[in-house]
Amino acid sequence: MRLRQWIASVLLIALAFGLSACASDNSAPITNAAELADAVWEFGQSHPEGFTLNIRKMTEPEEGIAVSYAATQRSHSRKQLENVVWHSLRHDGYVGGWLDKESGLYYFDSTRLYPEDELEEALGFGAVNGQRYVYIISTGTSVKIQK
C-alpha cells in the first residue's frame, strides 16, 4: 500500500510540473529532472536488488529486455542520477538500477527496453554500449554478452 501512495505522489508531482507533456516530445525542454531524479532515488532505496522503471509513467514493465546506454555508465550518486534522468527522458524513458555486490555500489543507468523476441538486437546494442549483460525482465535473468 505504501508503494502505491508513493507512486501516486510522484505522478502528481510530475503532472504538476508538466513532465507528462515531455513524454512524447524528446525536443521539449525538461525543467524538473531534479524532482524526478529525487523520485527515482527514493524508488531505488525501496528496491535494493534492482529495478527497471518507466520514468514517464513511474511504472515497472513486466516484460522486455533491459539494456543500458554507455553514456550513463558508472552513475551511482544522487547527482549522477540527475544526468541519467536527463538522458533517459531524451531517449527511451527508462531508468534501471542495480546493486553491484562486489563494490557495494548501487548503479543507475539510462536504459533501452527491447521486446523479448529481439534478444539478438538487444545483445548487439549492449555490445556497442560496452555492457556485459542484458536483463530479461519477465524471467529475471541476465544474459551475458559475448564479445
Image (cartoon, helix red, strand yellow):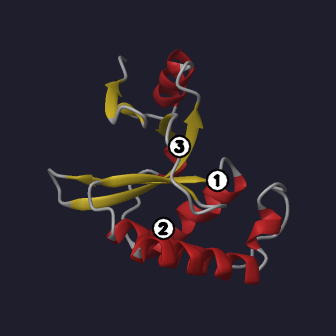
Question: Mark 2: few, some, or many residues within 10 Å (few <14, many ≥20)?
Answer: many
Viewer-proximal residue, 96 or 43?
43
Viewer-proximal residue, 126 or 97?
97
Which residue has dot 2 on it?
A: 81
Q: Give how far across and how far down residue 39 sits, in percent.
A: 51, 75
* Quadrant that contains the N terminus: bottom left
Give, as a three-letter code, the residue at label 1: Gly
Q: CA–CA distance between discs 1 and 3?
A: 12 Å
User: In the visual, does 115 lie left or right of 81?
Assistant: right
Which residue has dot 3 on it?
A: 69
Which residue has dot 1 on it?
A: 93
Viewer-proximal residue, 75 or 64?
64
Q: CA–CA distance between discs 2 and 3?
A: 14 Å
Closer mark to the observer between disc 2 and disc 1: 1
Closer mark to the observer between disc 1 and disc 3: 1
2 or 1: tag closer to the N-terminus? 2
Q: Give how far across and how far down residue 53 sits, in percent.
A: 51, 55
2 or 3: tag closer to the N-terminus? 3
Q: Give how far across and how far down residue 122 sits, in percent.
A: 52, 25
Give, as a three-letter code, the residue at label 2: Leu
Q: Residue at x 71, y 55 (%)?
A: 90
User: In the visual, does 146 lie left or right of 122?
Assistant: left
Q: Secondary structure at mark 2?
A: helix
Q: Residue at x 84, y 56 (%)?
A: 25
1 or 3: tag closer to the N-terminus? 3
Q: Give how far across and how far down residue 119 sits, in percent.
A: 50, 19
Viewer-proximal residue, 111 or 11?
11
